[in-house]
Image (cartoon, helix red, strand yellow):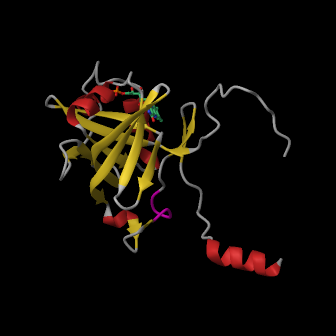
């Protein structure tokens, strides 16, 4: 495939699609929520999860103050909520009130888990690292909350019934297409064996 080559990454959209999450925080007696597409698992043991947050976000100060956050994994039908919390700041508006967000405090952290999330990680900040214009907050996962009916075998998201949000950048949201089950070990064996 012939590719266009350029020495800049503007617009910074080439790494999408990504799963869009809602990160919540709680500090000074208030809850806040923001959209986060830059996030990742870091370590299985101990379980660590990272979010990349600009110091310009109101959430940033709340994370510094509380040392806690939750990451909420959202179904595609919640894309408008992601756009709402990603398009407004907790410095101007109480998003939980304004957008009627249904949530409960975490079991291990004060930051809330959203009722409409199919799963959520409750995290305690164990590290912060500045890279360029964002800070990485490393969270130790203290607890997981997950909707049993959204999973098959208690493990795999039932994408026949529920599609996670897929964020394509530039305000474009979608869902997962029907999945293909690929046994990587078997495929490698067959491919190398046949070659
Ligand atoms: C889909 C989507 C994903 C986003 N991902 C991030 C992100 O990973 N990191 C970040 O700092 N801001 C991200 N933003 C921007 C924040 O969500 C946005 O600035 C929000 O208003 C911050 O809220 P706050 O000021 O209440 O913390 C994203 C916005 C959208 C719509």
Residue extending farthest to the right is: 2
Q: Is residue 97 above or below residue 106?
A: above
Answer left or right for 35 relative to 18.
Answer: left
Measuring from the top left, give residue 48's x and y in whole percent.
36, 52
Callout count: 0
Part of the protein shown in magenta: 158-162
Residue extending farthest to the top is: 92
Residue 73 appearing in the image: no
Q: Is residue 118 above or below residue 172?
A: below
Answer left or right for 163 relative to 147.
Answer: right
Which residue is more in the foreground, 140 or 116? 140
- What residue appears at the point 45 percent right and 65 percent down from the top-left corner? 158
Quarter of the image where the C terminus is located:
bottom right
Measuring from the top left, give residue 86's x and y in whole percent.
41, 30
Q: How would you classify the magenta stretch by its main secondary structure?
A: loop
Measuring from the top left, give residue 21's x and y in whole percent.
41, 43
Which residue is more in the foreground, 44 or 59? 44
Q: Is residue 173 above or below residue 117?
A: above
Residue 67 appearing in the image: yes
Q: Tell me the quadrant of ligand 1.
A: top left
- What residue appears at the point 31 percent right and 24 percent down from the top-left corner? 58
Q: Is residue 182 above or below residue 170?
A: below
Q: Is residue 170 magenta?
A: no
Measuring from the top left, give residue 62's x and y in whole percent.
25, 30
- What residue appears at the point 29 percent right and 57 percent down from the top-left corner? 144
Answer left or right for 186 relative to 69.
Answer: right
Answer left or right for 150 relative to 182.
Answer: left
């Amino acid at each position: 495939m012939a590719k266009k080559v350029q020495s800049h990454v503007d617009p910074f959209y080439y790494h999408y699609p990504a799963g869009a999450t809602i990160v919540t925080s709680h500090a000074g007696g208030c809850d806040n929520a923001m959209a986060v597409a830059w996030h990742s698992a870091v370590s299985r043991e101990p379980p660590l999860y990272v979010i990349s947050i600009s110091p310009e976000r109101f959430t940033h100060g709340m994370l510094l103050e509380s040392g806690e956050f939750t990451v909420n994994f959202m179904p595609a039908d919640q894309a408008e909520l992601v756009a709402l919390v990603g398009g407004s700041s907790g410095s101007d508006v109480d998003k939980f009130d304004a957008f009627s967000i249904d949530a409960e405090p975490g079991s291990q952290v004060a930051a809330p888990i959203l009722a409409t999330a199919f799963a959520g990680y409750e995290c305690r900040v164990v590290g912060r690292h500045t890279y360029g214009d964002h800070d990485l907050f490393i969270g130790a996962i203290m607890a997981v909350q997950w909707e049993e009916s959204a999973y098959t075998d208690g493990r795999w998201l039932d994408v026949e019934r529920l599609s996670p949000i897929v964020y394509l950048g530039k305000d474009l949201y979608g869902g997962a297409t029907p999945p293909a089950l690929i046994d990587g070990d078997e495929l490698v064996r067959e491919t190398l064996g046949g070659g």
